[in-house]
Image (tube, coloured by chain):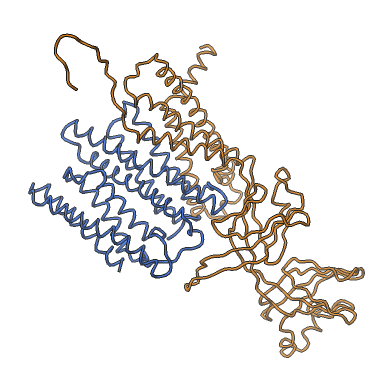
Chain colours: A orange, B blue
Amino acid sequence: MGVRNIVSASLRLLYSLRFAVWVLFVIAALSVVGTVFMPLLSLVVPPSIGAGSWLSRIISLLELDDIFHSRWLFILGAVLLVSLLSCSGRRVRAVGRIFLGKRDRAVDRQALSPLAAVCIHMGVAIIIGGFLYGQFAGFTGYVEVPEGRVVSLDSVIPPEQGGGTNRAVRCDDFSVEFYDSGIPSEYRSAVSFITGDKVVKRGVLRVNQPLIVDRIRYYQAHYNTLPLAVVAVEHDGETMTFAAYAGDVFELGKEAVIRVARIEDNFMNLGPAVRIDFVSQNEQGYVWAFLQRDDILRRFPEFFSRFPQFDPHRFESYRFFFQERKSMFATGLSISYDPGIAVVIVGSVLLLVGLFALYCVPAVGTRLPVHEATQGPRDIL
Amino acid sequence: MNVTVLNGVPFFYLAAFAFSVACGVTGTIRLKKMVTLCWGTGFAFHTAGLLYRWVESYTLGIGHPPLSNFYESLVFFSWAVVFFYLVLGYFKKSDPLDSFILLAAFILIAFASFSPGIDSRIQPLIPALKSNWLISHVVTCLLGYGAFVIAAVMGAFLLIRRPDTIEREWLLEERIYQCMVIGFLFFTVGIMTGSVWAHYAWGRYWGWDPKETWALITWLIYAGTLHVRLRRRWTERGMAVMTLVGLASILFTFLGVNYLSGLHSYL
């Protein structure tokens, strides 16, 4: 068999109906495996057996644990794409022959039908293309912004989309309303988008109402409550007060730095406490500051002196006190950029137009050859 | 009040089915009028119940179409089945086999009305469902499901009781095809409107969520079946089998995915 024959046979296979149907059903079967088989397997196989076993290695090798991002689906999608394009090419030639008069244009609907099928196939092909383009050229991300705080977007936005240019988002205000049943009825965030030191856009984000800033879409996705600790630091007769979320870092003049490492609601059954990491030129360590300090002293008079990590006087000339614990909202924002959307929209419109043209446009009529006759009987249609 | 009205509807559909079976067995013409009277009254109450539920949601200060929870979607699903029974004019043919369509509608609304685990109260919308896309997405999807259910019922007839003549078999197959095409069109629009909504709500139009994936599986099954029909070697029975495979996929898309973790779990 020559190369020409092989190419010809491959093309015939690609635009054959049987092959296209098999591809559709195999994609469906693979999707069933991805949604049902793997969750069922994880229920049946205990994690202790599954982890590192031959079964997990096979699953990982075959990429069955994430079928929807596997090579299997990618290859099948590519095969479907080629099949759709080759089938469309064949149909375009058929339509061309009809309109060029090389084939009998007997019934109008028959002339429309291959064109509609081309629309449908091209629509699906364009949707797949747009989806893949969006996957490769776009990105998605998520940030949680505590109320009143600024969070950098440089780690979320890739450099090719403008990341690393000191972009940040600030949550100016967050509010949530509840129904009587306790279910949230609406939540919204007033946000400011900052580039460098400049606010480039302000707006309100609600669920179903995203904001677009520099082609990047921001969505109100979730919300959370975060503990906020008001910490007082006494040093040389002066008191400095900080409102801190876990992880916040503060400089105490030029001599020392503190980091609020943890905020606990009930530490060792002694009530709310905050762990403060301390670094200075001479000392380094941590101390726990308790909100109910007086109460603890009454119950355990030697508690703070016996355990240095709980002693507010642990570090020379610095005293730490936990003054107030607050709950603050943090808004959860989804961030996405998908340049393939316009392509997908074009494909969707084409698919719909094709479907309605194929199935909803009634047959216009049948063209019958009529010859003028001067003699003989007349047919009345 | 709306629940009281809707709870009465299954009895009308069941009565219509019973009269239809009796009519088929005895051949009494008068019973045909009873069939029409029963399903017609049932459908009127069904429609009124849905509309009244919508109005009642506004009086409760919630104000949303009755399409937001499992009970409401089951009731609308059943309505969609009877709607196509009416629109496609099957009731005129007085074919006792078609009355099984009413049995399917009965099962759906009876499941909604009498299952102890299904909450029939009007519930407020969570923020993600507060969108105008709710109506277009849910209505188109459920209308698609309704047409597919009718196709599956007729497919089951074809498999269980082969028609007497080849013409009747072709006619039945043509009707199955008609319902599949209608369902496919509505379902395609439903998936597209859902994608647009997901794009606005979640920041992506496709996320391989179990519901989305199963909607795609259903779409692929029907797309494949419509293609296979183009092959002349495809028998009417093969088409009938595919309607049942499609029905299984719809039921999993509608019910089964609620047991998988995902954004569409509303049970």
Find the residue positioned furthest to the bottom.
A298
Q: Is residue B158 left or right of residue A238?
A: left
Residue at 63% x, 52% y: name it: A335
Q: Quadrant of residue A267?
A: bottom right
Where's residue B166, x and y in %? 19, 30
Find the residue positioned furthest to the right.
A282
Where's residue A171, x and y in %? 67, 63
Residue at 18% x, 54% y: name it: B16
Q: Quadrant of the N terminus of chain B?
A: bottom left
In this picture, is A330 found above or below B148?
Answer: below
Confirm whether residue A58 shows in the render: no
Residue at 49% x, 63% y: name it: B126
Q: Is residue B158 left or right of residue B131?
A: left
In the foreground, A158 or A36? A158
Q: Quadrant of residue A110?
A: top left
In the foreground, A262 or B13? B13
Q: Is residue A224 left or right of residue A24?
A: right
Q: Quadrant of residue A260?
A: bottom right
In the foreground, A44 or B175? B175
In this picture, is B49 found above or below A327?
Answer: above
Q: How many marks?
A: 0
Residue at 40% x, 70% y: name it: B60
Confirm whether residue B213 shows in the render: yes
Q: Is residue A79 left or right of residue A275?
A: left
Where's residue A234, x and y in %? 84, 79
Q: Quadrant of the C terminus of chain B?
A: bottom left
